[in-house]
């Protein structure tokens, strides 16, 4: 029972991480319909931006985190304007854009390695402490990971439902063609989606930098889990993306109480397979 | 008549001279302009840290040797290819490029799966393979022409288990890479440990490149072992140490590697961590190791780890083989000739200090040490006999 409780806590932490990634990826994918696999290295670049500001410029960690968020947002906008927008203007199919995304993934990932080196980058962890509650252990950074989901998720929810531009993003998520017909500036909305989605991903990137360190290749698993969480939750549903991420984290962790851990990395595939088979539109996806 | 005799004598002299110089010329022509040493390393992908340090070791050795006039008066040249962090197909393509385009006869290899993939090609084309990084025991004898100047994983794991046994530990738990290297340690340690009357209370696995191992560590914590063995390599070793300590576990932790990268990740949590490894620790009484470490730091701004040392040392072994091969003569870059040259005297100077001896199975037996992290430094404790 103690082990199950610990695995549940671990799953909640990992799930919060996946949920934040899925929020960012889902916002971009749902709004623009671009399968932005380069989301992974953009996420990694945010962590490196945070590391650079904290290490090379010796800035406090909160400032470095902000710098990481800004790095992510700028990289997201760059990706859209330089990589995807030209193809959209030419009326390229989604497959062509997907291939461009994979190409940009490889280029950006290798660029990070060339510029920053391939060793793991770390920052001095703040004295956030280790909390022992009976048999349960949780670190301060893990608590911040859960809190970050609550804060960022709430802020995004407020932005999307209370502001004019947020409502435009939601309208485009719901039906891009109709949004264009009623006069919504879809280019502007796409830029906001890329900036916001990448900025959201920069938050878990910064926390992973503090917790485990950053490597040029940290983005692969991130974009993969974000993609699975979005599909499980339902494309176009941000609530679904969050729940998809949490479900994935919890199953991946608590499911290992009986299953040998060598199978853990297969869990996401199994969940994805079952959802696609039983409910192809995801838990909260529309028609 | 006299004229004819003189003409005949001149002809004979000319033929003799031509045959002498011709033979000498043929021998010169058999030499390449440069000795190309191929290397198939992890130059990109998740484990590119290895490729970076290995290639740096190779380049330093080659530059040093070339600065002294090369080998047999011929400079060495590195041709570095990328197996993209363990991709066997990439390794095969790289090997074919090295052979067909670069006409390479000697290849330095790394990682288990790529080495296994290129081994049959090496046998077919009689290419000498020098492994300084791959640790799986399945690499022993994978090719007729493979040599290892890296202690293999199972040997290191067994030595670690032997130390735990001598320390009175009864219940151990293992956290392993789920790949050939991790499996080869577990397959060696588990029967050894049972044979010694101990219990393996948990054995958890993570994939190579894992960034999250909380589930595995939670299960190990629940099993309450006396000590934990880390049957994995960088950077997961550093992360595992950090997370084990963050989970509040105070048991001794022992592993088979601890690179500067691991030290950076684990930070102060590494205090007390023990590891068995190839013993590369430059010191004043080992002039070559000291010179290598100083040169490396000057070139690359970082201290060398043992991977850099192994590949640096590997180039020197190859250079010695080329010298010996040249003395044997014929097609002396043929792997069979180089193999014969190696076993004509299997002792080679080691950058670790002293000499290493190649055993009949192709593995160089060299000093293996037990280290402990004390005040952030790797303190050598003692030599441990490879079981």
Image (cartoon, coloured by chain):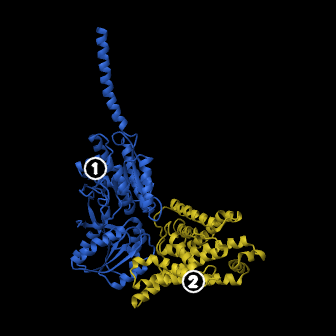
Q: Nearer the viewer, residue A251 or B321?
A: A251
Q: Is residue B205 above or below residue A84?
A: below
Determine if residue A30 is in view: yes
Q: Please give the chain letter of the residue carrying mark 2.
A: A
Label 2 – label 1 distance at C-alpha: 61 Å
Mark 2: which secondary structure? loop
- The residue identified by callout 2 is A279
Q: Nearer the viewer, residue A219 or B99?
A: B99
Where does the image place residue B126, in percent across and percent down from the top left?
Answer: 34, 49
- The residue identified by callout 1 is B339
Q: Residues within 10 Å of mark 2 (few under 14, many from 20)?
A: some
Residue pictured at 59% horizontal, 64% vertical: A99
How many callouts does the rendering have?
Answer: 2
Disc 2 vs disc 1: which is toward the camera? 2
Q: Which chain is yellow?
A: A
Q: Which quarter of the rendered picture does the N terminus of chain A lie within? A: bottom left
Residue B102 badge? none
Q: Which quarter of the rendered picture does the C terminus of chain A lie within? A: bottom right
Q: Nearer the viewer, residue A179 or B323?
A: A179
Residue extending farthest to the top is B1
Residue pictured at 64% horizontal, 68% vertical: A94
Where does the image place residue A194, in percent across and percent down from the top left?
Answer: 64, 71
In screen coordinates, is B379 left or right of B197? right
Residue pictured at 47% horizontal, 63% vertical: B45
Is disc 2 in the same subunit as disc 1? no
Q: Which chain is blue?
A: B
Give the quadrant of residue B225.
Answer: bottom left
Where does the image place residue B277, in percent across and percent down from the top left?
Answer: 31, 65
Residue pictured at 25% horizontal, 75% vertical: B191
In screen coordinates, is B274 left or right of A42? left
Q: Please give the chain letter of the residue carrying mark 1.
A: B
Where does the image place residue B176, in percent across and percent down from the top left?
Answer: 36, 73
């Amino acid at each position: 029972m103690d082990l199950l409780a610990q695995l549940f806590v671990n799953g909640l932490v990992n799930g919060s991480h996946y949920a934040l990634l899925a929020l960012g990826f889902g916002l971009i994918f749902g709004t623009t319909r671009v399968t932005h696999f380069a989301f992974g290295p953009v996420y990694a670049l945010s962590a490196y931006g945070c590391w650079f500001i904290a290490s090379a410029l010796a800035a406090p960690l909160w400032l470095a985190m902000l710098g990481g968020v800004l790095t992510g947002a700028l990289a997201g906008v760059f990706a859209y304007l330089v990589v995807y927008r030209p193809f959209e203007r030419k009326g390229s199919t989604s497959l062509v854009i997907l291939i461009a995304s994979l190409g940009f993934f490889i280029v950006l990932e290798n660029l990070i390695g060339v510029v920053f080196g391939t060793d793991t980058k770390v920052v001095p962890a703040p004295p956030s402490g280790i909390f022992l509650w009976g048999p349960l252990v949780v670190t301060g950074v893990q608590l911040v990971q859960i809190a970050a989901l609550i804060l960022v998720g709430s802020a995004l929810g407020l932005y999307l439902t209370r502001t004019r531009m947020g409502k435009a993003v939601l309208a485009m998520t719901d039906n891009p063609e109709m949004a264009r017909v009623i006069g919504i500036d879809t280019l502007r909305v796409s830029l906001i989606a890329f900036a916001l989605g990448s900025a959201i991903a920069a938050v878990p990137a910064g926390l992973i930098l503090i917790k485990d360190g950053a490597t040029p290749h940290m983005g692969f698993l991130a974009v993969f889990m974000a993609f699975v969480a979005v599909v499980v939750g339902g494309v176009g549903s941000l609530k679904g993306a969050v729940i998809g991420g949490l479900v994935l984290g919890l199953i991946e962790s608590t499911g290992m109480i009986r299953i040998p851990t060598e199978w853990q990395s297969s869990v996401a595939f199994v969940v994805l397979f079952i959802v696609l088979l039983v409910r192809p539109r995801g838990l909260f996806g529309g028609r | 008549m006299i004229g004819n005799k003189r003409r005949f004598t001149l002809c004979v002299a000319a033929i003799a001279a031509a045959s002498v110089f011709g033979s000498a010329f043929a021998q010169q022509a058999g030499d390449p302009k440069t000795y190309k040493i191929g290397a198939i390393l992890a130059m990109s992908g998740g484990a590119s840290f290895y490729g970076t340090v290995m290639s740096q070791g190779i380049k330093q050795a080659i530059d040093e040797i070339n600065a002294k006039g090369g080998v047999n008066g011929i400079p060495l040249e590195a041709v570095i290819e990328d197996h993209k962090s363990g991709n066997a197909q990439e390794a095969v393509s790289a090997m074919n490029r090295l052979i067909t385009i670069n006409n390479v006869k000697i290849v330095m290899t790394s990682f288990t799966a790529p080495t296994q993939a290129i081994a049959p090609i090496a046998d077919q084309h009689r290419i000498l393979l020098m492994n300084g990084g791959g640790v799986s025991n399945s690499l022993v004898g994978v090719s007729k022409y493979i040599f290892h100047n890296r202690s293999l994983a199972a040997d290191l794991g067994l030595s670690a288990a032997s130390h735990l046994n001598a320390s009175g530990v009864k219940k151990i738990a293992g956290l392993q890479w789920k790949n050939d290297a991790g499996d080869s340690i577990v397959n060696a340690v588990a029967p050894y440990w049972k044979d010694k009357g101990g219990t393996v209370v948990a054995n958890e696995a993570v994939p190579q490149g894992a960034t999250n191992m909380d589930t595995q560590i939670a299960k190990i914590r629940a099993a309450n072992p006396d000590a934990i063995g880390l049957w994995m390599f960088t950077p997961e070793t550093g992360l595992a140490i950090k997370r084990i300590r963050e989970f509040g576990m105070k048991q001794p932790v022992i592993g088979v590697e601890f690179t500067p990268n691991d030290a950076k990740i684990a930070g102060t949590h590494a205090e007390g961590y023990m590891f068995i490894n190839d013993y590369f620790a430059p010191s004043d009484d080992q002039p070559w190791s000291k010179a290598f470490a100083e040169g490396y730091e000057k070139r690359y701004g970082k201290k060398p780890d043992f991977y850099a040392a192994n590949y640096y040392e590997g180039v020197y072994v190859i250079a010695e083989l080329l010298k010996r091969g040249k003395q044997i003569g014929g097609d002396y870059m043929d792997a069979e000739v180089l193999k014969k040259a190696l076993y004509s005297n299997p002792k080679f100077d080691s950058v670790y200090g002293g000499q290493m001896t190649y055993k009949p199975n192709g593995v160089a037996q060299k000093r293996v040490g037990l280290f402990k992290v004390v005040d952030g430094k790797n303190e050598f404790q003692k030599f441990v006999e490879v079981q």
